[in-house]
Amino acid sequence: MHLWLIGLSASGKSSGGRGAAAALGVDFVDTDAVVEQRMGCSIAEFWGEHGEEAFRDLEAAVVAEVAAGPPAVVAAGGGVVLRDANVGAMRRSGVVVWLEAPPEELAGRIEGPGRPLLDGHEPAARLAELLAERGERYAAAAHLRVDTLGRTLLDVVGELARLWPSRIAVGDESEVFIGHGLADLPVLPEREGRERVVVLTQPGARPVADRVAAGAGQPTPILELPDGEAAKTLAVIEDVYRWLAGQGLHRGDTVVAVGGGSLTDAAGFAAATYLRGIEAVYVPTTLLGAVDAAVGGKTGVNLGGKNLVGAFRHPSRVVIDVDVLEALPDDLWREGAAEAVKAGFVGDPALVELFEQHGRGAPLGEVVRRAVAVKAAVVTEDFTEGGRRAVLNYGHTVGHAVEIAAGLRHGDAVGVGMVAAGLVSEARCGFSDRARHDAVLARLGLPAAATADAAEVRRLLARDKKRDAAGLRMVLLRAIGDPTVRHVDSATVETALAAVLEG
């Protein structure tokens, strides 16, 4: 993916873009410089001899070429938005950012001649005219806008670097993109043979689903599934199968799942099993979905217990729009934060420190990137949970049972489960950071206990997927970032339950 910078002359596209590219370690491209190289003369000279349209033709060819090339930060010419083909190429290939500042501010930054549209004019007045002519086109082309008024170059560089989309590979079959404004980009991987695209979503995610469907470039029907765990039933999946058949999907087509973790679990299972498996792309709209459910290829529905029917199948792509996640209410943020800090406990102490320092104010883009990186590394090593992947279940042994027995949200239940696992870790593994561990959970607003019937929790633990012939297995911590999986006896389980169950 590219980071395209658009805006009037002197808005900082070249200086800010060059700095951002250096900070990110990617290529920097200035389309005006490439055009001049092709012409063998300055833009002003070429413009004077051949006219604006000839220049715009060359500019369009360069934009198309850069769009098809390797990822880069690209400073585009001020008039690049005047042609719809340029705007389409930029929006399809990356995130477009409009660098803004008042005309009088921009005029003060201009040094010397050589700008055909400004030469011979009073700069501030001419820039105001250009803004009036192009402002609506800049706004329509841009996914994001950055105001550069009164900001240092270093500040602008930092802001642009923050907007760069990250890509994390999950094995050889799946990729995760994380960035700002991505829900408005085409989310589908390039692939031959795809004829139809459909979107499965849920009522709360419908506005994002509409944006994703609009970016698909073809008619894209949308089916709403129930919100939350109500989507994860075999009856709902049967309805989905019938709808997919009615849409005429074949094995070369694609299901895009737009919603929270329960939605991607259910939609992913439907895609994994319809016609013995068709392509799925996920656009998670909750923090829980982004850092956990959407990544790793686990799909499933409930059948008396949590996720007892399912399949391992990677989505071809996961697209995480940080802007969507930043708009979440506190309860949905807290639920996702539970899974994010879990990733820190089992694989990234720096992520735990991030939550310790900032709590609810932790930078969300970094939280998501770190949590996804932990899960991607583990899943790449052990896709079907034959070994190491089990560490991702930290807090889930007791957590899943409490979720059902107490009717808690998943994140809150996992928080309770992590408190139980921390206690057992201290007793069985000599885990010395239990006080710090529990303090982080408390700072995130996660509950330390739940009101549930102990007998029901025990019954659900007896059906846990992590139980084998030797008994119940729990993920425990020897230290933060150093997990292990061990069998635990009934006395240890009872001690843990006594600490976290009320009523």
Image (cartoon, rainbow, N blue to C red):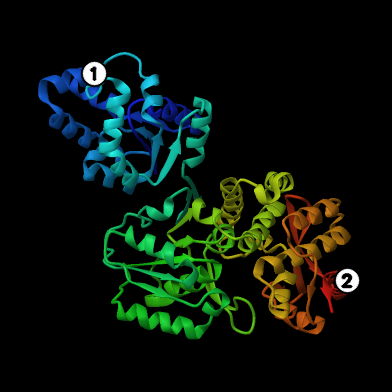
Q: Quadrant of the N terminus?
A: top left
Which residue is found at the position 65% from the left and 48% from the top?
Answer: 361
Numbered circle sitting on residue 12: none
Pick the front one: 346 or 412: 412
In this rendering, would 183 be left or right of 488? left
Pick the front one: 414 or 162: 162
Which residue is found at the position 55% from the left and 53% from the top?
Answer: 326
Question: Which residue is label 1 attached to?
Answer: 119
Q: Quadrant of the C terminus?
A: bottom right
Give the SS element for disc 1: loop
**Amino acid on which disc 2 is placed:** Thr
Which residue is found at the position 82% from the left and 51% from the top?
Answer: 436
Question: Which residue is label 2 attached to?
Answer: 495
Which residue is found at the position 72% from the left and 70% from the top?
Answer: 399
Q: Quadrant of residue 94?
A: top left
Q: Position of residue 346 (x, y in %)?
A: 70, 54
Q: Position of residue 344 (x, y in %)?
A: 68, 51
In this rendering, would 26 be left or right of 455? left
Residue found at the far top of this picture = 112
Residue 348 in sight: yes
Circle 1: is it few (<14), some (14-19), or many (20+) Cα within 10 Å? few
**Amino acid on which disc 1 is placed:** Asp
**Is mark 2 in CB contact (under 8 Å) with mark 1?**
no
Residue found at the far left of this picture = 50
In this rendering, would 37 be left or right of 327? left
Residue 68 in sight: no
